[in-house]
Image (spheres, grey):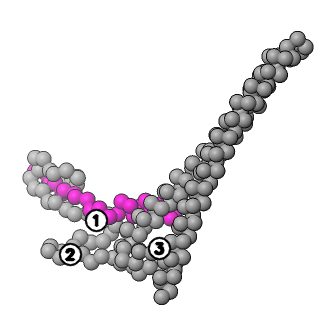
Amino acid sequence: MKPRLVLLLLAAHAGAALAQYKCTAANGAVTFQQTPCVGAQSEEKLVVVPNGHPPPAAGARPPAVVVPAAPGGRAGNAGKSVDERMLAGYQRQQQRDALEQALRTARDDAGKRAAQRNADVAAVQTRYAGDLSNTQALNDALAAIDSRYQALSVIDNDRIRSAQAALDNWDKAELAQARAAASAASR
C-alpha cells in the first residue's frame, strides 16, 4: 500500500477523540473499554486522542495546528489544520480515483464486448459451416451481429469519451487551483 494513502487513512481517523473507561473490579482487575463500566468497583473516564496530541487542559482551548501553505499548495488551505488538509487531499484523490475507475470500466466493457462479438461470429460460422444452402442464413446472421455490435460500439465509445473528458476536466481544474495557490503564495 502506498505510504501516502496509509498516512491519509490514518489522518482521517485522527481527528476524533475516543472516550475510554478504565474499570477496576472488586478483585483489582483493570480493564479498558469504550462503554461505561457495569458492576465495577471504580470507573474513570479517559479521553484518548488517536493523533497523538494531548487532550486540552480543563477549561483551556487547544491551539489549532496550522501550517502555512507551501508554494504549490491549494488555495484556501493556509488556515487549515494538517489533519483537515490531509483529509481534503485524500478526498480529492478519492474523486480522481473514481473518475479513473469509470474510464477503466468503460474501456474494459468495450474490450469484453469486442471479444463477445468475435465469439458470436465464430458460433454463427460453426452453426452454418459447410452447407452451401445456408449461405444466405449465414450472411443474414453475420449482418445482424455486425449491426448490433456497431450500435453497442457507438455507446461504448461515447462512454469512454465521456469518462476521459470528465477525468481531463478534473485534472485541469486541479491544475488551475494549484496555479492559483502558487500565484497567491508568491505575492
Q: Position of residue 161 (x, y in %)?
A: 64, 50
Image height of 68 relative to 153, above or below: below
Image height of 52 relative to 138, above or below: below
Residue shown at the point (10%, 47%) measured from the top left: 39
Q: Which mark, residue 49?
A: 1
Q: Which mark, residue 74?
A: 3
Q: Position of residue 52 (x, y in %)?
A: 33, 69
Q: Position of residue 133 (x, y in %)?
A: 88, 11
The reply to whether residue 179 is in sight is yes
The mark nearer the N terminus, 3 or 1, is: 1
How many marks on residues? 3
**Numbered disc 2: secondary structure:** loop
Foreground pick, 16 / 103: 103
* Mark closer to the observer (2, 1): 2
Residue shown at the point (22%, 58%) measured from the top left: 19
Q: Which mark, residue 61?
A: 2
Foreground pick, 22 / 152: 152
The mark nearer the N terminus, 2 or 3, is: 2
Residue type, mark 3 in image: Arg
Residue type, mark 1 in image: Val
Q: Label 3: few (<14), some or many (≥20) within 10 Å?
A: many
Residue 36 belongs to the span the image colors magenta? no
Residue type, mark 2 in image: Arg
